Amino acid sequence: MSCSLRIKCGDVEVEYSGEEGFAEKHLKPLIDSLAKSLEQDGPAGAAKKTTDHKQNKGASHGSAITTSTAATTLAAKSGSDLALAAAFVLHSGGKDEFTRNELIDEMRAAKSYFNVNYVKNLSNILKTLVKQGNFLHQGGDDYALSVNCRADLDKKFA
């Protein structure tokens, strides 16, 4: 059975859409922790503790937006779209450059959008995004969002 939830407490926002079993197993401890912190510390203390938990456990590296949310906003329909959403989340989390593996990990975080074939086709996806001017190849396995792409994405997420 599938479920959707969205919880916002101060600067912290948890959004999930997917299988109920996953939510019970993985999100329930986070929600319980948030509720307990609200009782003890009020909203500010709960937001700080939840942010600390997210930075330690989450794939979005402390970013305020999830890859699933970014993919939804960009209406992602392809591996290139999901890679762009993942790169934006990494950038929003303070990473100006990212590796192929970091990009894959972030793409995997968007479970509703991720397809294992995206990993198999990652070289072609990256090549396309570089040719389109969205990514800059920094050498080796390192990439970055182009300045123009960052500006366009910042407008979409403002």
Image (cartoon, rainbow, N blue to C red):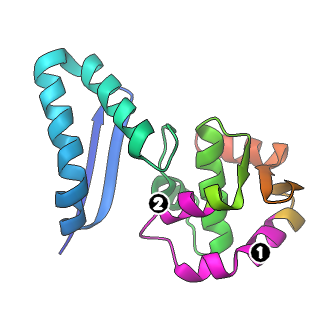
Which residue: 42% across, 39% down?
Answer: 56
Label 1, label 2: how far apart the Cα atoms are: 19 Å
Count the numbered circles shown.
2
Q: Is residue 60 left or right of residue 29?
A: right
Which residue: 20% across, 42% down?
Answer: 31
Residue stretch in magenta: 104-129
User: Where 145 falls versus 115 (above or below)?
Assistant: above
- Corner quadrant of residue 103: bottom right
The residue at which mark 2 appears reads as 109
The residue at which mark 1 appears reads as 123
Residue 125 is one of the magenta-drawn residues: yes
Q: Is residue 122 left or right of residue 23?
A: right
Quarter placement of the N terminus: bottom left
Q: Could you say which is closer to the camera, residue 25 or residue 75?
A: 25
| Disc 1 + disc 2, Cβ < 8 Å | no
Counting from the top left corner in percent of width and height, residue 138 is at: 87, 51
Q: Could you say which is closer to the camera, residue 146 or residue 50?
A: 50
Which residue: 79% across, 54% down?
Answer: 142
Q: Amino acid at mark 2?
A: Ala
Q: Amino acid at mark 1?
A: Ser
- Corner quadrant of residue 82: bottom right
Quarter placement of the C terminus: top right
Q: Could you say which is closer to the camera, residue 109 or residue 157?
A: 109
